[in-house]
Structures are given as C-alpha cells and as structure tokens.
Amino acid sequence: MKGRREGVGPHAATTIYLVVLAVGAVLLAGFSSRVHPISVGPDLIAVLALAVLAVAYPGVVVGDRVHLAISSIVMLAAQAVVGPAVVALAGALIGPFQGSSWQGRLFNSAQFSIFGCVGGLAFLAAGGTLDPAELAGVTPVVVHLALPMVVADLVQVLANAVLLSGMMRVARGVPVRLHIGLLLRSTGAAAAGYGVIAFILVVLWVPAQLGVVVATAMVLAPLLVAHWAYRQHADELQGQQRVLGVLVAAVEAKAPHLTGHSARVADLSGRMAEHLGLTPQQVADTRIAGMLHDVGQTTLPTREARGLDLTDPASTTVGYPRAGVAILGDLTFLRGALDSIETHRRALADDAAASLPSRIVALADLYDLLTQVGTPGGTVYAPSQARDLIATEHPGPRTEELVRALDVALTRAEELST
Amino acid sequence: MTPLVRVPDRLVSRTVVLLGLVAVCTGLIAAGNLLPTLLATHGHTLLLAVALVAGGELLRIRMPSGRETAPLSSAAALAVVLLGRIAGEPTFALESGLVVIVVSAGLAIAAAVRRARGDVVGTPALAARAVGVWVAAGLARGVGPSDGTLWAAQLSSTTSLALVALGMVVVAAVGLLTELVLVAGIRAERQRTPWVAAVRDEVGEAAPLTLAVVVTGPMVALMAPVLGLLALPVALVPLAMAYSAVRQYASNRETNRQLIGTLSHLTEHGGYTPEHHAERVAALCLRIGRVLGLGDRQLRSLEYAALLHDLGQISLLDPIPDGATVLAAPADQRDIAEEGARIIRQAETLDDVARFVETQTTAYRLVRELGEPVPLESRIIKCANAFDDLSRGTDDPVLVDAAMERIHLGLGYEYDPDVVDALTRVVEDASVGRVDGRSVVAG
C-alpha cells in the first residue's frame, strides 16, 4: 500500500482524528469477533507468525511509493483462514512497527486494523468460506475463495485510501477526493498482485495441504526476489541523484565561483514550484532544471567561464544553455527539465513566451547570483536590494507573483534551517 | 605454430545444439504413435503449456550486464516437467522425452515469432533450455522405479507433501543450473573469456531470479490438484512481480550508465578530448577486462572509470593537443587524474571509480618494484587509453601497429604485461571479449 504514514502534526484535529480511528478500530474488532469468534489454534498462531514476517519485511520505499507490502498479503490471506477479528488483531500488531512518531504508530495500528477488518467482513459478505479445506473442485474454489478474496482486496484498498486521505486532509489540508484518486491510481496494479499472491498462499496452505511453513516459503521466494530488486532500484535512483551531483561538481570545477550555486537554485526553484501549485512531477523537473541549468558552461573555455558576468542582462545572448541541452538531451528522465534549462537565461526578459518552470528557474538563478555569487567585480546585493532590482528590471504582475513565491520559499528554507 | 589438433569453431555451441536435438529426438521416439492420442487426452494442458513457454520466451528481460533471460518461460517449462494431477483434467502422465517435446514446441513457436520480427533467435541458448528440461524431466519422471519416482510421489497419499515440494525444488534447480552452465559455456566460447568467469557471472547474475523460477514450477504442480489448469497462469503472478521489479531495476541501471556516458561527453563538448574517445576506451577496457576474467561488478566500475578517465581535463586553462594525455608530462597526467577523481568523489557511490581514475597514470614498474597498490582496473585503463591516443581512435593498420609497438616498448616498465597481452589478443581478433547479449539467452 502506498502512503505517507508519518509526519502527523500535533494539531488538535489530527489528534481527534487519531482517537476516532483508534476507537473505531476497537469497536470494529469487537463487532467482528461477534460475527466470527476468535478461536485459538494453530491457524491463529500461524497468522501471528506471518504478521511478524510482515514486520521484518515492511516493504521497500522507491521514490514516494511503498513497493511490496507483505503486510497486505498476510492480511488478505488471513481473512480467508481465521476471519476478520484475528485480522484486526494482526493489523493492530503490525501497524506500530511502521512509523517513528507515536502518532504515526497509533495511526498505522488503527488503520491496519480497520482496513484488515472491513476486508475480512467483505470476504464473508461475498460468500467466502473460512474453511477452504472443504472446497472440492475448481468452481467452489473460485466462487468461495478467489472471488471473495477479490472483493476483500478491493474493499481493503479502498478503506486504506479513505483512511489515509482523511489523515492527509486533517493534517495537511490535501483534498480527500484528490488524494484518494492519487492513491488508487498508484496502488491499483500492486493491490491486484497482492490479491493473487494471498490466494496462492491460502491454496497451498489449506486445500493443497502443504501447511503454512512450506506454503509461505514457496510464495515468499519470488517476493524476496522482488524485494531485492526494488532495493536495488532504490539504490540506483539514489545513485542517479549522486551522479547528477557529479555533473554539478564538473561545472564548479570549471567555474569555482559558482560553488554551491546550483544546489541553492535547485532548492529555491523546487520550493517556488511547490508554492505555485505545480504538480509533483513538474516540481521535480523544475528542481532538476535548477540544479543543471549551468551544465552548458562546461563547454566554454575555462577562462571565459570564469569571467562571465551572469548578473548582467546584456549577457543573455550567451549560448551555453543550449549547449547544456545538447549534453543532456539523450537522458530521457531529464526531458521535463530541458526547456527550463534552455530558456532560463531569457525567460524573465521574454516573459510571455516562457513557461512557468523556466521563469521560476530564471528568477531563482538571478536572485542567487545577485545575493550569493555576486558580479565579477565583487558586488553582492542584500536580499531586499536584489528583489527590488529584479522587480525594476522585469516589471509586471507575473514577476511580482514569482517574487512572492520566492519570499515564501526563502521563509520556508529559513524555518527549516532553524 | 600449427596446433596438433584443430578445435572446430563454436564447438560448445554446436555440442549444445546437438544435445538439444538428441533430447527432442528421444522425445519423438518415445512418443511413437502416441502423439495424436496425447493431443486428444491432454489437449487443453498441452495448449496452455506451449502458449506459456512461448509467451514467456517472447518476454525476455535484459539484465544490467546485457544478458537476456526468460524467467517466465523457464518457470513454465519446469512446471510442465513437474505437473501431475490436474483438477478437471486427466493426470499429466508423460514420459520425460515427451515433456521435452512439449517445451520445445513452445520454444520453436517463440523462435518463429522472433525470426518473423527480425530479432535474433539464439538457437544454442534455446537448445540449452531443452537440455535443462530434459535433465529435470529425467530426474523427476525417470529416476527410480515406476511408482517410486518424484513425479509418482506427488500422487501418493503416503508421502509427505513437504518432502515432495523440496524434491521438486531441487530437481527444478538442477535443470535450471544445467541450462545456465551450458549458456555460460556458449558465452565463454563466443567472447573467448575464461569459462569459470562466465559460469560465475551467469549464475551470479541469474541467482535471484533463479530462486524465483525454481519454486514456480513446483508451485504449479502442487496447486494444480486444487485449481486445475488455472494453477499455471496464477502461479506465474509472483514471478511476474519479481520480473517487473527486476526490469525496473535493470532499466534504472541503464539510465545510470547513460548518465555516466553524458558525464564522459563533457570534455568532448568542451573540445578537450576527441569525439567518442571515452566510449572507445571504455569498450576496449571492457573487452580486456573480460579476457582477464573480471566479474560483472568489477567490469561495471571499470567501464564507468574508463568513461570518466579524462574528466579532470574539464578545468584545464589550456587544453592538451588532441586531448592525448599519453603524450602529456607525467606531472600533468597526475594532476588531471587527481582532479577527475576529486570531481567523481562528489558521488559517494562512485568511490572505487574515483580510485581507478586517480591511479590510472601510475607506471607499472612502481607496482612491480615498490609494490604500489594500483588496481588492475587502473592498469587496464592506462593501457587502453594509450592505445586509443596512439592509434588516434582509428583501425588503420599502420597506426594500430605503431601504437602496439610503442606500448610494447613500455612493457613491464609503463604497462602491465598481462594487460598488454590481453590488449594484443583483443586487437588481433575483433570477436574476443565482445558481448552480444541478444544472441545468448539464459533462463
């Protein structure tokens, strides 16, 4: 399942939401135990052991997504073997291990318990049997096991999305419908895969009579491979960011006076893009454009690169941004950043034609050049002077909007640093 | 000197193809006139099995090293080997030779589709798959008395199913390992690299996926008594998830390779080094590295370091003529290498690459006489870079001979003799150390 299960703020609304969820989880578990009482036996112990396994393999975070949540598979399988009340208990036990703050742990515990429990109730409502050993023939297996598990899977995904989106609404003001849509789009395929794997686990465990240990070992092998591959994937993504850092280091070796400039422009550009409501992908592209906007300078003779006055509007004819695009053009994952890299030097002067990400990078670049890098003569402006200078040289409502975004970005950066 | 016995070209490839043919012929002989009857009784099972083997073969995955593998096809083939009781269908009681026929039919269909598309078929690798299946089927269905084989044990109510499952996993692993070793042999022969290194890399890179593949066949066989033929596609889902994850990772690795390639172009765009110099040096280093038996991980770092070996030139105030560092003063060579390493160290994950770049200028005599710790990778880069600088990146025989002569003059003093020996083999034979991943396919 995807989700940001951390970062729950200490606001009253969040606390109330957490308490309501926790109480709801307890009530739902109580109701479930009346529908199908908990019976202590080997299956219960096996499910709790699987819950421990789910804690040991909490899923791999790649980018902002959690891949391979074994907990979802365990809970789906448990719904068909031990019923919703035990699943609620298992969920409550798994949740606290997936969070660092107490609010995060409490939320995850309640959330896992609730979505597992409603999934289990949906399984029973859809005609699912809790005694799959009795199923004889393919059709009964499909009707009383496979299809109810599909229903439970759907309900579980939906419940997870609603609960998470509720938290995002309360804690961060993100519209519920928007967040539910995002979650369903990003987790749909994985959830279908979890459903099939849980079904295999149950079939091997009970009707095929392999027992929980052998069944789990067989199902787990491909999942461990996927787990390993996602970890490699995450490492490669991290490596990619570091190699981009080497590109910046090459620029700084060529023009040492720009040391730190690219990182600052990337940071400012990203924050401004967030404030101006760009999509997550656009924010990421704008940030990368800010980081790599000067790569073209590596094509200049070293003396020329070290003598450039980038604060001078007259130097907008310098062609290095295009050279930067020529260098980076083959890298498909940078496609969204190329326009801003190519046009940032003329984006403020050519306001009408330039895209918003390009103007963001242009303004962040100019502001940092004026306040941090300075002119070749050594002139460095104070932040207020730099803002006034930018507003005077590039008058208009669009620049004013950008300068406001810049102010917000600077304030946020300051808040974070303190 | 003329060898006493002339080894035929592609002996391993031909032997593997021959073994594959023997496996298929054995199956055909075993089938005799049973084939029409089998088609009538097991029509659905055979159709599904052939379709999954063929489909999986068409969904090959390219691993980070460039090897291609077909895990879904291998898993489907091993499932056919182990299938016994199937709910709603007659028990899949086939001779081991017939199992090979079924799998080979799927592989043949995939090969025909590939040929129609204009893709490389890779017949020896397909034959290796058939041989692997033959071995696994022989072990599962042919070893032991007729009622005491592993295959028969799954039908027995007295044998522990956990033991049967374990036996199935072992048999699947042996079959898959047979295929991997044969494919490694084909690869070693084509690249003229040590077989041991090829086997190590083949098995090493395939290991995680192999783990997933060897349990999928048994999973199908053990679920089929409950799920019927539905077990075949359903059991492939976990493997498909692993396949998807590995594909994403492999694609990301390729992106990182492109990113390093972009870094290597910085000095070319700036006019410091000749066009494609870094790419040529990297390709040459890889070939030399393979001849010297370097593993995949070492080869990757070697390639990255070779691509970035001139990065330090980026901040030179006055470019070196033609970017030929081999002709620059030793102190300048060292400064460039150190500057390059400093820049590369910004990426903490590329520490070994930075080290190879940093020590690439060290003369071999310092290794020999003073025991300086210069990695083999650095010695390879030094030699390959000198060759490309001196031959000016062309294959003009006069320039190539002159470059080799100059390098031989520095043998043992400037350059590592083992590396020069490997370079000589690579320069003399264009096929030595080259990888053509698409023509050698493992499961």
Image (cartoon, grey):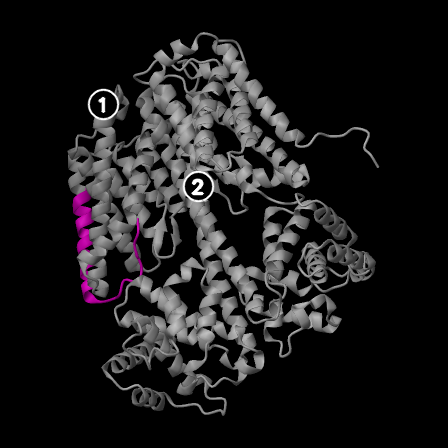
Q: Quadrant of the C terminus of chain A?
A: bottom left
Image location of residue A398, percent across then percent down: 25, 79
Image location of residue A234, percent across then percent down: 44, 54
Tell me, yes or no, if residue B352 can be seen here.
no
* Chain under callout 1: A
- Furthest toward the top, the residue is B33
Image location of residue B249, percent across then percent down: 45, 49
Which residue lies under the disc numbered 1?
A140
Residue drawn at the location 17% of the way across and 44% of the way down: A28
Q: Is residue A12 magenta?
A: yes
* Chain under callout 2: A
- Kind of residue sitting beneath label 1: Pro
Circle 1: element type: helix
Front in this rendered view, residue B21 or B179: B21
The answer to which quarter of the image holds residue A366 is bottom left
Dots 1 and 2 on the same chain: yes
**Crowd rating for badge 2 (residues with CA inside 10 Å; few <14, some 14–19, many 20+):** some
The answer to which quarter of the image holds residue A116 is top left
Magenta segment main secondary structure = helix
Residue drawn at the location 40% of the way across and 43% of the way down: B244
Residue A224: numbered disc:
2
Front in this rendered view, residue A286 or B34: B34
First reached walking from the N terminus: tag 1 or tag 2: 1
- Measured along the vertical axis of the image, is residue B399 above or below residue A411? above
Q: Is residue B289 magenta?
A: no
Taking A79 as reference, is B337 left or right?
right
The answer to which quarter of the image holds residue B360 is bottom right
- Residues in magenta? A1-29
- Kind of residue sitting beneath label 2: Leu
Residue drawn at the location 81% of the way across and 62% of the way down: B370
